[in-house]
Image: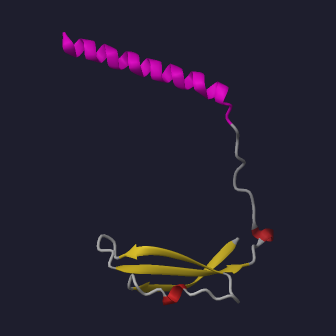
Amino acid sequence: MTYEVDQILTVLPDDVSALAIDPNQDYVTLVTCTPYGVNSHRLLVRGHRIPIKIKNARVISEASRVEPLLVAPILAIFIFILLLLVITVYRKLRY
């Protein structure tokens, strides 16, 4: 689904009139607090559904799957070396 922002409102927390359901429209509304740190009002960002433009869609990069059986030993070796380093430094500082 793709939505396009068509309305941005700042309202008081008890003002829910802008959230009324319109059965003839397909809206989504994001509600967040504003201004930052004060949070005395609510920021309402509303969008309506638009058609997905398939012809303009393109794959930017192919996702590659990394085998867990390959990653686990490499990660274990890295942690082991890091642990040895910490122990060595601790022993040198202690004596």
In this view, the residue in front, 45 or 78, is 45
Location of residue 30 in the rendering, given as x and y in whole percent from the top left corner: 52, 75
Q: Is residue 73 above or below residue 46?
A: above
Say which quadrant the C terminus sits in.
Answer: top left
Visual colour scheme: secondary structure
Which residue is pictured at 68% across the width and 73% down the height? 2
Residue farthest to the top, as pictured: 95
Q: Is residue 71 above or below residue 29?
A: above
Number of numbered callouts drawn: 0
Question: Which residue lies most toward the left here?
Answer: 95
x and y, in percent, of residue 58 in the image: 75, 61
Q: Which residues are magenta?
A: 66-95
For the stretch drawn in magenta, the main secondary structure is helix
- Quarter of the image with the N terminus is bottom right
Q: Residue at x 30, y 70 (%)?
A: 37
Q: Taking 86 as reference, is 46 left or right?
A: right
Compared across the picture, whether 9 is left or right of 86 comes to right
* Front-lying residue, 51 or 30: 30
Residue 75 forms part of the magenta stretch: yes
Quadrant of the rendered image containing residue 51? bottom right
**Percent from the top left, x then y, of residue 57?**
75, 65
- Name the residue nearer the viewer: 16 or 65: 16
Q: Position of residue 16 (x, y in %)?
A: 47, 86
Residue 14 location, quadrant: bottom left
Relative to residue 50, is residue 90 depicted above or below?
Answer: above
Give the residue at x 33% y 72%: 36
- In front of the other: 66 or 62: 66
